[in-house]
Image (tube, rainbow, N blue to C red):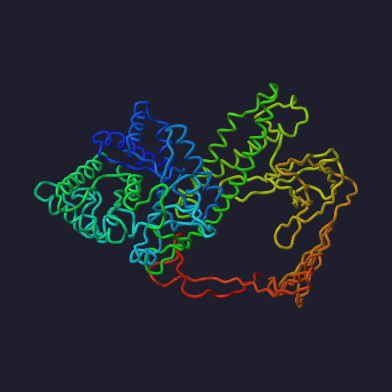
């Protein structure tokens, strides 16, 4: 979703596009159509009858309908973690394998705001041979066009051979819409977008409308568009040309299918009937294009790649005109960018625990009540919500507010559901007597130590209430390496004892939980300790109240400007630093750090192993925005000049 939510787009446009596709492609076997995102396609598929499904399979088999890329979405290529990029590809491809028995061959990425070699690598490893990209800096496009290098083998920087090469087509012009795909003149190309015929809801901004093709104008109109095709072909190395015919949410109305296909077929028929024009024009899929391109350029399965140049590197940062660099979205809506990573980590942890629990549940009839089917559905839903959020208008932070709330709600619900999967799975795994397992949805066996109340709220640490009877603290290591990690939980009192999974006392530190900058809360205390867990391990620690605790209490040095601490704390030693302090020093057995007493920023590091001092400089700076009409925003970063360094002290 961008201007509408995913479900609203499906209701208003997407389902109608796909319904019309089945009808209109069957009317003429020369017609072709491509589809990319499986999120929409699967939702549509679930609501159609068997007859329509059979028709889709026939259209795919006959080469009229092609799935390109086949990921859950067309993802952004800058903000996501590679885990999520792979996961949404897997989700889409597994759906295709299960429901259609097909595997995509070519990548189609026309709208991400810049392109990453990581995506090229993932597509290559997926088994793709070809890919297409569009949003590249306009100056780069111009340079590539003059050099005829818009088609190239994209190779990874670290590849000394050619094993990562994937054939890539870069679209040469401003956009992927019809006015910018037939050739260099959008005023002419727009006249061949037949949805813009007079009387329709959309028109050409160049104020020259399309004309319906008929016997009286077909020669002139065919020559007009062929001239654009020839000019565009001069930018490439072969005689094979691609001119995509679509745009955002096009073909939702039956009338557009007729307008586009019928008028273009008349143009193609006329061109092909003129042997002196030396042209063969037809509808085609992306695979049709790359197949013809490889044949024309002599690229067989075993031939060399020397016909096309080899390129390594990335296509960031994108600009479509002037100095309009699309780097604003790298930091837009950071709360949801973080929520994406939180869901990602919960998903991986839940998948591993669920798999291990499934093995255990299959070994014993007594634990057949383990909700494996229900929890697998929750895992699938979480994968799909994570995948959906990788879309180039979601994780980027460029959607409208209500669409962002819809995305956030999906992420939040999946986090809640994954916590349930983790709890249910861990329950089985920690029981010595598996026969004692009892699943009760109303009373979960475990609780997570953080609580988040809504999609736009920050998580809060739960306060564990201690008594002389042990509370069990279950810690999970979701990585494949042995871990020594500091774990912190909040408890209701400072007199604490912690026992390891082997029942041995563990050294803990008690730290303050702060109400504001200078006030210590006595409703909660932070307990920190070093947990040691094997790969993919679960460890059960015991926390209990004791009369006399051997825990280490944290000490605090506080520096306050123009205010004083109200009164000494009854538990923690809090020392107020003087205004004239020069440096703040932190030290352990490995290093010594000096911080400015005025700014609190790091200034020097001493590494004790070699005795060397390293001078540091940390600055906080800010950019203004331009005074021009175009401003920095969700997409663009348009500063008014160099960054300005500022120190801001709050009273």
Q: Residue 160, image x and y in percent?
A: 53, 58
Considering depth in this image, is 105 or 491 the residue closer to the camera? 105
Considering depth in this image, is 357 or 457 the residue closer to the camera? 357
Q: Residue 257, image x and y in percent?
A: 25, 41
Outermost residue, top side: 365
Q: Is residue 397 left or right of residue 18?
A: right
Q: Is residue 606 left or right of residue 52?
A: right
The quadrant where residue 191 appears = bottom left
Outermost residue, right side: 548
Q: Is residue 535 left or right of residue 120?
A: right
Q: Quadrant of the C terminus?
A: bottom right
* Residue sitting at x 44%, y 32%: 99
* Residue sitting at x 69%, y 41%: 448
* Residue sitting at x 79%, y 65%: 590
**As drawn, 209 above or below 589:** above
**As drawn, 158 above or below 101:** below
Q: Residue 69, image x and y in percent?
A: 43, 45
Q: How many marks?
A: 0
Considering depth in this image, is 38 or 399 the residue closer to the camera? 38
Q: Residue 268, image x and y in percent?
A: 20, 47
Outermost residue, left side: 216
Q: Is residue 304 left or right of residue 380?
A: left
């Amino acid at each position: 979703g961008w201007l509408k939510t995913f479900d609203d787009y499906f209701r208003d446009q997407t389902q109608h596009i796909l319904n019309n596709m089945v009808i209109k492609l069957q009317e003429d076997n020369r017609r072709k159509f491509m589809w990319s995102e499986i999120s929409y396609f699967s939702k549509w598929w679930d609501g159609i009858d068997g007859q329509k499904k059979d028709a889709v399979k026939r259209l795919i088999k006959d080469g009229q309908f092609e799935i390109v890329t086949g990921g859950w979405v067309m993802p952004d290529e800058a903000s996501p973690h590679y885990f999520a990029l792979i996961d949404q590809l897997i989700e889409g491809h597994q759906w295709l394998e299960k429901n259609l028995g097909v595997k995509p061959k070519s990548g189609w990425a026309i709208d991400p705001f810049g392109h990453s070699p990581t995506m090229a690598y993932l597509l290559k490893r997926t088994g793709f041979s070809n890919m297409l990209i569009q949003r590249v800096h306009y100056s780069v496009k111009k340079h590539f066009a003059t050099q005829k290098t818009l088609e190239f083998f994209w190779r990874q920087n670290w590849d000394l051979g050619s094993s990562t090469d994937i054939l890539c087509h870069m679209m040469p012009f401003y956009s992927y819409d019809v006015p910018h795909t037939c050739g260099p003149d959008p005023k002419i190309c727009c006249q061949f977008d037949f949805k813009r015929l007079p009387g329709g809801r959309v028109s050409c901004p160049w104020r020259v409308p399309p004309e319906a093709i008929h016997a009286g104008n077909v020669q002139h109109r065919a020559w007009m568009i062929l001239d654009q095709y020839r000019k565009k072909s001069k930018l490439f190395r072969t005689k094979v040309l691609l001119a995509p015919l679509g745009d955002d949410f096009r073909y939702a109305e039956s009338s557009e299918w007729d307008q586009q296909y019928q008028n273009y077929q008349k143009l193609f028929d006329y061109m092909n009937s003129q042997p002196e024009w030396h042209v063969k024009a037809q509808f085609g899929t992306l695979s049709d294009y790359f197949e013809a391109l490889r044949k024309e350029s002599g690229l067989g399965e075993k031939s060399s790649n020397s016909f096309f140049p080899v390129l390594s590197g990335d296509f960031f940062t994108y600009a479509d005109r002037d100095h309009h660099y699309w780097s604003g979205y790298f930091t837009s809506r950071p709360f949801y960018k973080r929520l994406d990573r939180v869901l990602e980590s919960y998903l991986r942890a839940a998948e591993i625990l669920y798999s291990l629990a499934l093995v255990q549940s299959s070994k014993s009839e007594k634990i057949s009540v383990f909700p494996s089917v229900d929890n697998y559905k929750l895992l699938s839903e979480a994968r799909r919500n994570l995948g959906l959020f990788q879309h180039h208008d979601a994780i980027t932070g460029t959607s409208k507010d209500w669409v962002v709330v819809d995305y956030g709600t999906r992420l939040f619900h999946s986090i809640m559901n994954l916590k349930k999967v983790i709890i249910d799975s861990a329950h089985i795994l920690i029981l010595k007597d598996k026969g004692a397992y009892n699943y009760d949805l109303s009373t979960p066996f475990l609780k997570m130590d953080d609580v988040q109340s809504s999609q736009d709220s920050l998580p809060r640490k739960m306060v564990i209430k201690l008594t002389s009877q042990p509370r069990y603290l279950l810690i999970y290591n979701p990585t494949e390496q042995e871990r020594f990690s500091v774990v912190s939980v909040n408890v209701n009192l400072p007199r604490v004892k912690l026992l390891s999974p082997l029942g041995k006392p563990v050294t803990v530190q008690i730290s303050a939980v702060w109400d504001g900058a200078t006030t210590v809360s006595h409703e909660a205390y932070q307990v920190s300790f070093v947990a040691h867990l094997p790969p993919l391990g679960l460890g059960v620690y015991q926390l209990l109240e004791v009369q006399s605790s051997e825990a280490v209490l944290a000490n605090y040095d506080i520096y306050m400007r123009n205010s004083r601490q109200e009164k000494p704390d009854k538990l923690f030693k809090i020392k107020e630093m003087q205004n004239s302090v020069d440096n703040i020093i932190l030290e352990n057995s490995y290093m010594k750090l000096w911080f400015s007493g005025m700014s609190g920023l790091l200034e020097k590091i001493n590494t004790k192993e070699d005795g060397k001092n390293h001078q540091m400089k940390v600055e906080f700076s800010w950019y203004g925005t331009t005074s021009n009409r175009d401003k920095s925003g969700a997409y663009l970063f348009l500063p008014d000049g160099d960054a300005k360094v500022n120190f801001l002290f709050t009273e």
